[in-house]
Image (tube, rainbow, N blue to C red):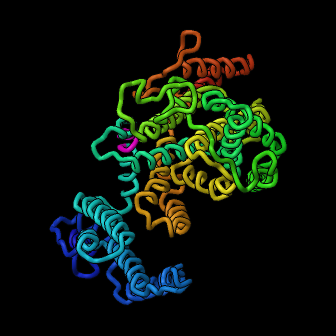
């Protein structure tokens, strides 16, 4: 018996390839050998076939996109070939696939070394800046994942237990996230005064915060109410044109037009909400998409009122709360900003003021969203998102809830549009196409629907990185598509998909947080269940039956509350 057991243990601990998959590392422990033997044996022919197939697919996608480019010069148009760039792109794809294959077969050390080599190649090889970004990011991700897998093997954690490790990592992220968010807020506040700050960096910050504001506004409809809105750019356009037209025809200041633009956008949101009350799913999305196109066509064709495709220029800039103007020589009766506060004139004063203005607007949206989630309205939105039929059966008015979501979300979109108009000084229908709705929706989906922090991170990635790395702009739509596909595969619910519960019956220590008539919620529910079970028991029933029904109702209710 002992001989057979030892033979079985030896067979299970032996590696199929005769070597440890962890990059040649051997271990004397039987438990670790069991972990290492869980990886499949190295199959060279299969690896070669997979790399060949990857090369074929990458070539079919890369060569039509990168090889030939039309260049406009003084002599005219001509076609420029970029074969070396195409070959480098295919090589990057194949190298990345090889790294994933090494991880799959348990060669963590080799994968980590490959990641480090990729990072070094980005600094020492003459490659385009776009490939430098890909090499550094891809090499860092590959090396980090290899080190994590190696740590799990060394700790004798089997691959089947990695899901639990990732769950623990998610708990750690939830604990660290509030501190990271606080540091991000502090960094955003002091950014204009940092030593490395510049006009360009502040301008990029304004652009990112604008999309954060739009993403948080759309999150009310998509993330909380669960309604797919493809025409959110319509409210953005209504807010921008409301400010421009009110300032042009009635000479209203920015501070008067800002709330008016939000109210007008909310009215358009209610106008859209009524026809789509009974629609769900794809039909709802199609109607919202049509509404966005209707607004854009009205802006183009109503030439007398909106100036058509020519747009509206010379939109007034905001003053410093009606106290001073940011111009060197103000045209109005207000004094100049630098003279009022005894500063040297700088054109960055207005830009810094716009930065803090949009930062405050984004903070207002975040505070409002966090507050409304804990109100009955926010809980009704979440109930509508989970199951609108069940929520209606509980007495929730789907009509009023949907209209409230549309109105509130459209209000923030209109305020963002008003800020966009005063920042740009010029607006036209070309600024409010469907691609803007797609970008805003991509930010919400990539960040995690319902997650304010995730949406802010997605806005930094999708808006900030293309601005910092200009060469990515040429492949912006490819980046969007690739990012969406990767998120759907690895993070189906977004980068930071977890959300804090709207209400907790139990605190973090497992104690009841709420009391009803001097008793905890669980005690009250248990008492009610006990009373109901006892009352329904007939006089002919025995005491054992009564006590059994009571204990079952009590334990069942208590378990439900605990869950």
Horizontal relation, residue 44 to residue 497: left or right: left
Residue 336 image point, x, y percent: 47, 29
Residue situated in front as seen by the camera: 515 or 75 = 75
**Extent of the magenta region:** 172-177
Q: Which residue is drawn at 67% across and 30% down?
A: 252
- The residue furthest left is 28
Q: Residue at horizontal 59%, vertical 21%?
A: 526
Which residue does the image show at 79% across and 35% down from the upper left? 399
Q: Looking at the image, which is closer to me, 526 or 185?
A: 185
Vertical arrangement, residue 462 with respect to residue 111, above or below: above
Question: Residue 173: x percent and y percent?
Answer: 38, 44
175 within the magenta span: yes
305, above or below 483, in the image: above
Q: Can residue 60 be seen in this view?
A: no
Magenta portion: prevailing SS class: helix
Where, quadrant-wise, is the N terminus in this rendering?
bottom left
Task: Let me know if residue 439 is in the magenta part.
Answer: no
Q: Where in the figure is residue 7, as x and y percent of width and height?
A: 24, 74
């Amino acid at each position: 018996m002992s001989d057979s057991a030892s033979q079985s243990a030896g067979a299970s601990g032996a590696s199929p390839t005769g070597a440890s998959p962890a990059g040649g590392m051997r271990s004397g422990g039987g438990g670790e050998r069991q972990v290492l033997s869980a990886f499949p044996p190295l199959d060279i022919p299969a690896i070669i076939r997979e790399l060949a197939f990857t090369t074929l697919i990458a070539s079919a996608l890369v060569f039509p996109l990168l090889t030939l480019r039309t260049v406009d010069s003084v002599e005219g148009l001509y076609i420029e070939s970029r074969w070396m760039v195409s070959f480098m792109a295919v090589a990057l794809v194949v190298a990345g696939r090889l790294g994933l294959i090494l991880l799959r077969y348990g060669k963590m050390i080799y994968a980590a070394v490959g990641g480090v080599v990729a990072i070094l190649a980005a600094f020492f090889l003459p490659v385009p800046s776009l490939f430098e970004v890909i090499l550094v990011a891809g090499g860092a991700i590959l090396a980090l994942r290899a080190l994590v897998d190696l740590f799990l093997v060394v700790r004798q954690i089997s691959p089947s237990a990695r899901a639990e490790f990732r769950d623990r990592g998610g708990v750690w992220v939830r604990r660290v996230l509030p501190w990271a968010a606080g540091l991000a807020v502090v960094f955003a506040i002091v950014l204009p005064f940092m030593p490395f700050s510049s006009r360009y960096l502040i301008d990029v910050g304004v652009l990112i915060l604008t999309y954060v504001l739009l993403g948080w506004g759309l999150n009310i409809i998509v993330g909380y109410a669960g309604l797919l809105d493809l025409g959110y750019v319509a409210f953005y356009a209504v807010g921008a044109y409301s400010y421009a037209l009110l300032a042009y025809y009635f000479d209203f200041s920015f501070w008067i037009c800002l709330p008016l633009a939000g109210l007008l956008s909310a009215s358009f949101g209610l106008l859209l909400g009524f026809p789509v009350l009974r629609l769900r799913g794809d039909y709802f999305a199609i109607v919202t998409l049509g509404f966005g196109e209707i607004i854009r066509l009205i802006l183009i064709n109503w030439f007398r009122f909106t100036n058509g495709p020519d747009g509206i220029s010379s939109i007034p800039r905001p003053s410093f709360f009606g106290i001073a103007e940011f111009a060197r020589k103000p045209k109005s009766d207000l004094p100049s900003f630098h003279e009022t506060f005894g500063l040297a004139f700088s054109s960055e004063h207005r830009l810094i003021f716009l930065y803090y203005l949009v930062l405050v607007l984004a903070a207002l949206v975040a505070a409002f969203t966090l507050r409304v989630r804990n109100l009955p309205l926010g809980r009704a939105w979440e109930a509508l998102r989970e199951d609108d039929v069940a929520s209606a059966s509980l007495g929730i008015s789907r009509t009023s809830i949907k209209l409230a979501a549309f109105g509130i979300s459209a209000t923030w979109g209109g305020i963002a549009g008003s800020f966009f108009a005063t920042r740009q000084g010029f607006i036209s229908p070309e600024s409010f196409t469907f691609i803007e709705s797609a970008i805003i929706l991509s930010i919400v989906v990539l960040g995690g629907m319902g997650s304010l922090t995730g949406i802010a991170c997605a806005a930094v990635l999708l808006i900030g990185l293309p601005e910092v790395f200009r060469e990515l702009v040429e492949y912006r739509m490819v980046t969007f598509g690739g990012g969406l596909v990767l998120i759907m595969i690895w993070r189906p619910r977004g980068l930071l998909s977890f959300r804090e519960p709207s209400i907790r019956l139990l605190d973090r220590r497992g104690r009841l947080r709420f009391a009803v008539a001097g008793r905890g919620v669980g005690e009250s529910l248990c008492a009610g269940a006990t009373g109901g079970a006892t009352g329904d028991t007939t006089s002919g029933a025995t005491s054992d039956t009564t006590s059994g029904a009571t204990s079952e109702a009590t334990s069942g209710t208590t378990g439900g509350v605990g869950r």
